[in-house]
């Protein structure tokens, strides 16, 4: 399908395929393998002399539809799906890098990326330098001859810091390295990092692409030479492949992605403004607020603020836990990206494995509460939070 269509159209139609049954809703090809008419046809397909499906670790029509739809939404040349968002980050690193290579990564990326880079990749001889997301001079200084990958998340989760994607793309390209952006927080409905110079976009499709908190899934979209080459080969060979069922859930989820993201962003903005006026709240982190230190940049890169916000409650961990424990409607859970609003305490959950000093430097202080805003009426969520803030 032509990518000249508008994003709303691509979300509903891009990548769609029909089988001989002519089904209207995209089919779920829940099969491990595909049959051939003859031994010769099988040989040709394995040798890549003839296109077609072979085995669902690396080719599956439902997975292909998911990949093609996401590529269209991101404005990417190609996309490869993975079992989870972390599998996408691991595939990115292990598919592109070798021992001796160097990564520069933003402080405050998704918590599990830190042990992946600092423990698992470090053991394989791949070193990482952590730099504050917004410190452009720090990124320039961190570049080495061996630097091959710059990895960021913008806005960051849960501190909602915003990176200048174009400036970091320039630094990466000056160093002959690749800039990969985790676009999980915005999804392509609100932000398309490739337009600002990113080479690759990483997704935890577990979040807004599914959108209803059902399945784990991941993907990497971007330059065809990287995606259809080393990254696809890594998935095919090492096996962190997505289940066709999970790909189907995300494929169908993307049909309502823009509607959800716009509605959830509007709810988040309303709640952020209200939280900012509460005496018990020290600070609200939300790119859509005028008070955000990089509001103007965020609004150039994003069409809305997104559905995740965080706020610091006066009184540290005790006060933060009080707000969380007083909720009756909002779900206490580590996930976000759901239509149901979720709340969590990052310092003792999602980011609990990061050393406290590093955590503080990333703005993940003891009083910080993260809210993944859903589709409930914001006044009901507000009443739920009010109880713990007044307490
Ligand atoms: C959840 C998340 C991940 C990891 O995704 P999984 O699907 O849980 O493996 C990566 N990055 C961000 C920003 C996330 O929120």
Image (tube, helix red, strand yellow):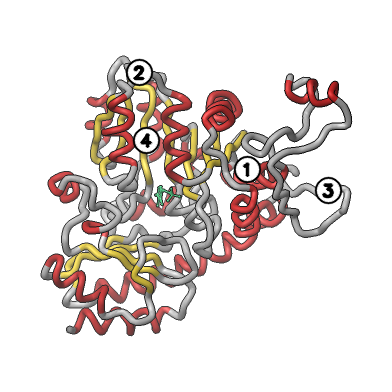
Residue 156 sits above or below residue 259 on the image: above
Q: CA distance from mark 1 to mark 4?
A: 21 Å
Nearer-the-camera pick, 372 or 236: 236
Residue 99 is tagged as 2
Q: List x then y, in percent, for residue 86.
A: 42, 43
Q: Quadrant of the C terminus?
A: bottom left
Q: Quadrant of residue 304?
A: bottom left
Q: Does any portion of residue 258 appear in the rendered image?
A: yes
Q: CA distance from mark 2 to mark 1?
A: 29 Å
Q: Quadrant of residue 75?
A: top right
Q: List x then y, in percent, for residue 240.
A: 52, 38
Q: Which residue is mark 1?
A: 67
Disc 3 versus disc 1: nearer the observer = 3
Q: List x then y, in percent, for residue 347.
A: 22, 57
Label 4 Cα crowd, 10 Å radius (few <14 / some 14-19 / many 20+): many
Q: Does any portion of residue 261 appear in the rendered image?
A: no
Label 1 Cα crowd, 10 Å radius (few <14 / some 14-19 / many 20+): many
Q: Which residue is mark 3?
A: 19
Q: List x then y, in percent, for residue 158.
A: 31, 56
């Amino acid at each position: 399908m032509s990518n000249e269509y508008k994003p709303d159209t691509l979300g509903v139609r891009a990548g769609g395929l029909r089988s001989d049954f002519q089904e209207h809703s995209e089919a779920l090809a829940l099969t491990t393998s595909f049959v051939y008419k003859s031994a010769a046809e099988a040989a040709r397909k394995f040798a890549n002399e003839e296109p077609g499906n072979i085995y669902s670790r690396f080719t599956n029509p439902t997975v292909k539809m998911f990949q093609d739809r996401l590529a269209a939404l991101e404005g990417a040349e190609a996309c490869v799906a993975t079992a989870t968002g972390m599998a996408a980050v691991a595939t990115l690193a292990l598919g592109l890098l070798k021992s001796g290579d160097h990564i520069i990564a933003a402080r405050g990326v998704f918590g599990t990326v830190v042990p992946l880079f600092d423990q698992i990749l470090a053991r394989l001889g791949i070193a990482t330098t952590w730099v504050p997301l917004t410190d452009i001079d720090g990124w320039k200084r961190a570049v080495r001859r061996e630097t091959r990958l710059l990895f960021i998340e913008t806005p960051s989760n849960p501190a909602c810091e915003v990176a200048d994607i174009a400036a970091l793309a320039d630094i990466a390209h000056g160093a002959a390295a690749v800039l990969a952006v985790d676009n999980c927080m915005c999804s392509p409905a609100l932000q398309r990092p490739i337009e600002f110079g990113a080479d690759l976009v990483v997704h935890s499709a577990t979040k807004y692409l599914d959108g209803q908190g059902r399945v784990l899934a991941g993907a990497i979209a971007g330059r065809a030479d990287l995606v259809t080459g080393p990254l696809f080969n890594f998935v095919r060979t090492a096996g962190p492949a997505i289940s066709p069922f999970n790909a189907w859930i995300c494929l169908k989820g993307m049909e309502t992605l823009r509607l959800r993201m716009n509605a959830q962003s509007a709810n988040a903005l309303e709640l952020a403004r209200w939280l900012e006026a509460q005496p018990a709240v020290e600070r609200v982190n939300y790119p859509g607020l005028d008070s955000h230190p990089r509001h103007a940049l965020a609004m150039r890169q994003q069409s809305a603020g997104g559905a995740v916000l965080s706020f610091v409650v006066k009184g540290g961990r005790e006060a933060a836990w009080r707000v969380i424990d007083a909720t009756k409607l909002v779900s206490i859970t580590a996930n976000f990206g759901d239509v149901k609003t979720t709340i969590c305490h990052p310092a003792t959950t999602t980011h609990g494995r990061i050393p406290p000093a590093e955590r503080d430097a990333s703005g993940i202080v003891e009083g910080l509460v993260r809210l993944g805003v859903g589709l409930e009426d914001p006044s009901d969520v507000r009443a739920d939070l009010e109880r713990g803030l007044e307490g």
